[in-house]
Every structure is written in C-alpha cells, then in structure tokens.
C-alpha cells in the first residue's frame, strides 16, 4: 500500500484548556477512508534529561513523589524546556545541576524519545553527562526530591525485575548499557 | 531526609474535559512546603503492547501516521485496554491479531512502562509474543497501518542511529536484546 494512503489529515485543532505543563486540544482529523473523527492532542513544549555518570561509574538518580501515579518513582534527572525553542542541551545541564547539585563537564546526546505517540508530541532529548563537578542543588520551589547514586548493575537489575518503569529512565539505561558501556 | 516529607498531598481533582482516549483533570496539590498548586493530570485507562517475534527471529512492527507528531512512526503493535479492568494479556493478544493478522501461541510479560510520569498515569504492559500463527488482520474502522518485519539487528541499528524514538518500542527492543536474546 502507498504510504500516502495512510496519512491522516487534520482539519481543525481547538484549544480546550491551557494547563501548567501541557495544553489539551481537541483535533478534528480526516482518516484515510474519508471519515472525520475528534481526537485528543496533548501539547508539550519538550523536555531534556541526563544520564549522569560519576567518575566511579555510579549513576545519579532522583527519587520523587509523582502525583500522576500517587507513588514514588526513581528517575534520571529531567525537566521541561523553558519554552519550545530552548536548546535541549542547555535545559539538560540546568536540570541536572538544579536537581542533583552536579554540573556536567561533558554532555553528549544518548537518545531521543517520544514518550507516547498516541496523544502527545512530548519529546525528551536524553544526554549522557560525564565529568561531573559538584556545585549545589537549587530545586524549584515546588520540587522535592532525593538524589541517590546506583551502580549500573543495580539499575539493570531493577529493570530486569520490573522495579524501574519510567520510560525515559528505562530506555536511557538500556541504551547506555548496550551501546556505550557494554563491558561494565 | 525522610521520604514522608517528600509526599505531595492531592486536595482536589477536577475533570476539565473527557476526551476520546484520555481525560484531562486539574489537580490541586499541596506540596511538602505547605504551598498549594494547580497541576495537570491526564488520565489514561492503560494499554498493552507486544514484541512479536516470528519463527525466523524477525520482529513484526507497524508503520502508521501519528496525528500528534504529524509524521509516520514505526512501533510495536499496541492499543488501549477496553476499560481499565481488562487484563493486559487479553488486550495485547487482541491488538496484535487485529493489527498484524497474527495470533500469539505464547505471551510472557517483557516489561511494563509508565510512559511519562510528570502528567499521566498511562501504563503499558509489553508482552513478548511468540509461536505466532497467521490469521487475518481486522483493523478498527479508524486505524490505518502497514505491517513490516525487521531483523533484531536492523531495529537495534535504528535505535543506535536515533531513527526509532517511540518509548515503548525502544525500551521493549532493548530489554529483549539485553535480557532475552543477548546471543543473536
């Protein structure tokens, strides 16, 4: 089948609610058979994250309470962009230092994920952060979290057993293990 | 620091809009310093996906146009639950057969992801699907996609180069490679 025949054509996008970190839109979409449907679209300005590796190989993680899940999660440091045009590398360095009190001497893109393509454009650029220098933590006034360092093996064990479930964290650790640090 | 001091207490959850696959809520949350804030919550009933492996080792993928991204994506087969109490294994088998025309002879949980914990409770149980039997595709009336089979090496190459970005797809393929089929 020709790919052209699989394209959905958006006829309208209507803002229903401007939220704090996402905006909810109602899209009117013409699907390939000609029918018209109303779909959800959750607009996000994008985010940046880091996989911060200490000189001894341990990885810095943040433990925080997540309202959407009603429980604690263990995640790599991350945060939203200050506007959709902010370079993700700048945001990644800022969020890392704010949340953990470490400034990265080196950042390189590890991978980009689209978190959930069925309803949002949220995209996270995830950087490998090395040559970390201790500075100090500056959390946002509404941010409360704990920094913890884990060995790669411990984190892989948590992924194997299903303890770690956050998609950016799982994909970053697995990509690091397979493509950057397979020997460790 | 005591974990108890990191918990956010939700004071109110107000439905703003019931969407097609998600519902948008405005939460009022008391953060640990006592301040009250209004946050976004996007409720999702949960989803199921499969990593379908053919007898020759190739993996079935679906190519589809995604309105939220305005482009095509290559993803593992997936779909929403029919209500939040549907067992994810049932949904995974159904979505696989509907989308690809293959019925799984065997399903085992590969991993669970939370797609994006900052604003949604969406959770995807991803099953490894093997012993696939050819039946026939039955797409939903508003679903248009193409089924393609790729070698694991080709998919890993796409993850390495950044061509594959969908979080459920990236994390499922990497977990399969590291923990189920490292030798291939």
Image: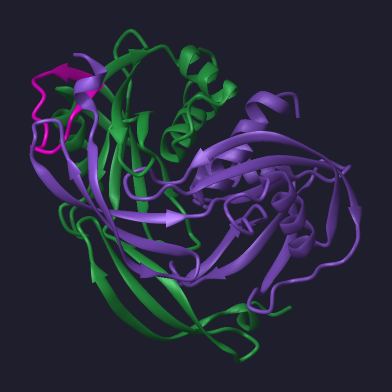
Chain colours: A green, B purple
Q: Residue at x 45, y 16 (%)?
A: A152
Q: Position of residue B131 (x, y in %)?
A: 89, 42
Residue at image x 38%, y 77%? A26
Q: In this view, does B67 lie above or below A130?
A: below
Image quadrant for the N terminus of chain A?
bottom right
* Image coordinates for residue A51, horizontal then vertical, percent: 34, 29
Image-quadrant location for residue B117: top left
B81 above or below A90?
Answer: below
- Considering the whole magenta stretch, tell me its main secondary structure: loop
Extreme residue in the top direction: A56
Q: Is residue A136 covered in magenta?
A: yes
What percent of the width, then of the height, locates residue A175?
50, 32
Residue B25 lies in the magenta-colored region: no
Q: Residue at the spot x=33%, y=50% of the render?
A: B119
Question: Of A117 and A130, which appears nearest the observer?
Answer: A117
In this view, which residue lies farthest toward the front? B11
Give the residues in magenta.
A131-146
Residue A41 in view in this figure? yes
Vertical arrangement, residue A56 with respect to residue A67, above or below: above
Residue A153 % position (x, y)? 50, 13
Residue A18 horizontal side relative to residue B64, left or right: left
Left or right of A138 in this view: A40 = right
Say whether residue A104 is visible: no
Q: Which residue is more in the foreground, B65 or B36?
A: B36
**In the image, is A99 to the left or to the right of A23?**
left
Dividing the picture into quarters, in which one does residue B95 lie? bottom right
The mark total stands at 0
Query: Which residue corresponds to the image point at 67% horizontal and 55% vertical from the top-left?
Result: B77
Closer to us: B96 or B57: B96
């Amino acid at each position: 089948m020709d790919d052209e025949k699989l394209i959905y054509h958006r006829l309208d996008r209507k803002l229903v609610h401007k939220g704090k970190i996402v905006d909810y839109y109602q899209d009117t979409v013409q699907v390939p058979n000609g029918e018209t449907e109303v779909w959800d679209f959750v607009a996000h300005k994008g985010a940046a994250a880091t996989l911060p590796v200490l000189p001894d190989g341990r990885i810095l993680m943040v433990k925080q309470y997540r309202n959407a899940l009603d429980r604690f999660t263990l995640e790599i440091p991350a945060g939203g962009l200050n506007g959709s045009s902010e370079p993700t590398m700048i945001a990644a360095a800022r969020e890392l230092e704010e949340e953990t009190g470490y400034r990265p001497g080196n950042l390189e893109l590890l991978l980009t994920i689209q978190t959930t393509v069925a309803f949002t454009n949220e995209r996270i650029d995830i950087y490998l952060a090395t040559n970390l220098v201790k500075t100090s933590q500056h959390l946002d006034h509404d941010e409360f979290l704990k920094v913890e360092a884990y060995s790669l093996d411990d984190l892989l064990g948590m992924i194997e057993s299903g303890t770690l479930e956050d998609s950016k964290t799982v994909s970053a650790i697995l990509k690091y293990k397979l493509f950057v640090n397979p020997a460790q």
